[in-house]
Amino acid sequence: MNEQRKAKLSTQDAQIAKPSRKARATILATRPLMRWRGVDLITAAMLAVAFGVMFWGFDTLVYPFLSVATTGFPPLGELMLGIWLLPAVVGGLVIRRPGAAVFTELVAANVELFLGNKWGAAVLLSGVLQGLGVELALALFRHRRFGVVVAMLAGVLSAVFEIVFYEWQSYVAEYSSAWKAIYLGCGMVSGAVIAGAGGWLLVRALARAGALNAFPPGQEARETHPV
């Protein structure tokens, strides 16, 4: 009987000593939130430049073919929108400070404008609106939650801001109400999947690769996968 009790106690001790497999804790940006570090600005700018070059490549090599593919039902073309929302989501998830989403998206739009695109300077207005949608999503959680659900919400709100406040009037003003609703729905799906979930996965991949060691995602990756 005593041996059984000892074995039971040993098992309980082992369970207590065993590391918890709970979801990793969210690491917040250093306070105060409005005080950006130099590394924040440099990293956000580098991410934005990379995305701006990606925009140019997508605009030049991919967008024309996808546009032709959706000529039968043009509202489906808005399923591509999430590509242009990525900088705002990624910037917000990495820097985790107010203004990061707008800054990253707007710099990326400037790079796209400099390299050349079919929309001209209008991409700058889009950059601001797309960034504001992400800023709103992060502000709703007081810059304390940065999981995939929050990222997807950020992508959705970014799409809503872009479409409702700009594209409905500028690009698809002639659409019927039904087509505009479908157009918005396609943009929201794209924002949630491509920009939201895709951006979140990209940030995790960069963090695991060690590219974000100076930022909360990198610290979370190190705590989850200690060397």
Image: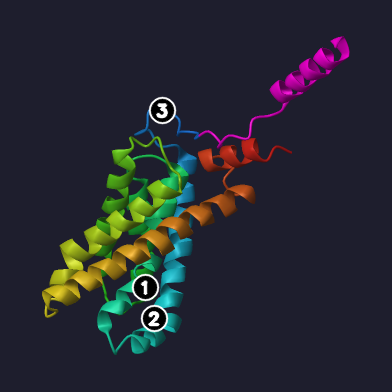
Q: Is residue 12 magenta?
A: yes
Q: Which residue in the protein does label 3 denote?
A: 31
Magenta stretch: give its range: 1-25
Between residues 42 and 72, which one lies in front from this camera angle?
A: 72
Residue drawn at the location 44% of the way across and 53% of the way down: 90
Q: Quadrant of the C terminus?
A: top right
Residue 171 placement, left or right of 6: left
Residue 198 position in % (x across, y down): 47, 60
Query: Disc 1 residue type?
Result: Met
Q: How many marks?
A: 3
Query: Disc 2 residue type?
Result: Tyr
SS for dot 2: helix
Residue drawn at the location 46% of the way across and 76% of the way down: 57
Mark 1 / mark 3, whichever is N-terminal = 3
Q: Nearer the viewer, mark 3 or mark 2?
A: 2
Q: CA distance from mark 1 to mark 2?
A: 8 Å
Q: Determine contact: label 1, label 3, CB under 8 Å.
A: no
Q: Which residue in the protein does label 1 denote?
A: 80
Please tell me whether residue 97 is drawn above or below residue 178 in the rendered image.
above
Query: Disc 3 residue type?
Result: Arg
Q: How is the image coloured?
A: rainbow
Q: Which residue is most to the right?
A: 3
Crowding at dot 2, Cα within 10 Å, few <14 / some 14-19 / many 20+, comes out as: some
Whether residue 110 appears in this view of the structure is: no
Q: Nearer the viewer, mark 1 or mark 2?
A: 1
Q: Determine contact: label 1, label 2, CB under 8 Å.
A: yes
Residue 177 position in % (x across, y down): 12, 73
Q: Which of the 4 image quarters holds residue 158?
A: bottom left
SS for dot 3: loop
